[in-house]
Image (spheres, rainbow, N blue to C red):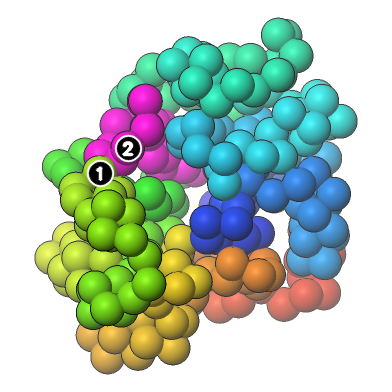
Amino acid sequence: MSLFIASLNSGSNGNCYYVGNQHEAVLIDAGISCRETERRMNRLGLSLRKVKAIFITHEHSDHINGVAMLAKRYQLPVYITTPTLQNGGLKIQEHLVYSFRAFEPIIIGSLEITGFPKEHDACDPHSFVVTDNNIRVGIFTDIGLPCRNVTNHFSQCHAAFLEANYDEEMLETGKYPYHLKNRIRGGKGHLSNRQALQLFLKHKPAFMSHLFLSHLSRENNRPELVRDLFTKKAGRTEIIVASRYEETRVYHIRNLSRLGYNVKSSVVDMKMQLSLF
């Protein structure tokens, strides 16, 4: 068994991540429009017919802007905590709203999706790990600091979307007002490049094949800066920078640890994508 993953968009202008197998898939957040989600998935050869649910991390607009329309058009269940639903002002058809509890897995086909609390300035923020046959993919963005929940789950993942929001020097010398700088770096905001790298180096399992650097700030970071920072120390883990302007490729995540070695999984060829999805 294996998982196919992609970032459809990652940044303060919208976040949406795809995780699925050959039969079913889920979206983590839907912060871009329904039409744009359709366009990007179509370009990747991914079908929304395979998507069985949307999971919401928290109520900030860049994570929920497309939820209501996407759920209505495709009649997709939306897994969201009650405080997040109430504070997000979302108008989702009642029969599509499903609550979830931290650490209690949701089963969708052969996928198992588990949410857990994290540190962020939202009412009830969660991150998620998606598992299929012991292959784990984690989505770790919008994190003020790497709490034990985050590090424990990260250390079990074969692939992960990890926030690397800002370069500390760029934030300090940049144009943001002082109160916003403090919000970003104050323990309930976002992870810096340095914090993300420390988390990666300290908690990365030997079998992690792919790391997607995610939720980069447009003003306080540069893709080439954070890519170079991680690539120098990534070993055999492939580093991908998730863009705020376009989708990534689809990546094929397999469990190679059982074979006794760590080999990077290959990018899915476009023709193969079309046949699978």
SS label for mark 2: loop
> Is any part of residue 25 visible from this angle?
yes
Q: Residue at x 60, y 57 (%)?
A: 13
Decide: marks 2, 1 in contact (CB < 8 A)?
A: yes
To which quarter of the image does residue 104 belong?
top left
Q: Amino acid at mark 1?
A: Lys
Q: Is residue 120 magenta?
A: yes
To which quarter of the image does residue 39 belong?
bottom right
Instruction: Give the magenta-colored segment's residue range.
Output: 114-132
Mark 2 / mark 1, whichever is N-terminal: 2
Q: Residue at x 34, y 75 (%)?
A: 174
Decide which of 45, 219 is in the foreground and name it: 219
Decide which of 93, 258 is in the foreground and name it: 93
Decide which of 218, 76 is in the foreground and name it: 218
- Above or below, 172 relative to 125: below
Q: Which mark, by number, is residue 249?
A: none
Percent of width and height locating residue 234: 28, 81
Residue wearing tag 2: 121
Q: Left or right: 166 with respect to 63? A: left
Percent of width and height locating residue 134: 40, 45
Q: Residue at x 71, y 19 (%)?
A: 92
Decide which of 207, 229 is in the foreground and name it: 229
Q: Residue at x 36, y 65 (%)?
A: 176
Residue wearing tag 1: 188
- In the displayed image of the protein, which residue is found farthest to the top? 94
Mark 2–mark 1 Cα distance, whole angstroms, equals 5 Å
SS label for mark 1: loop
- Above or below, 113 relative to 276: above
Q: Left or right: 261 with respect to 80? A: left
> Is any part of residue 227 visible from this angle?
no
Q: Amino acid at mark 2?
A: Asp
Crowding at label 1, few (<14), some or many (≥20) Cα neighbours within 10 Å?
some
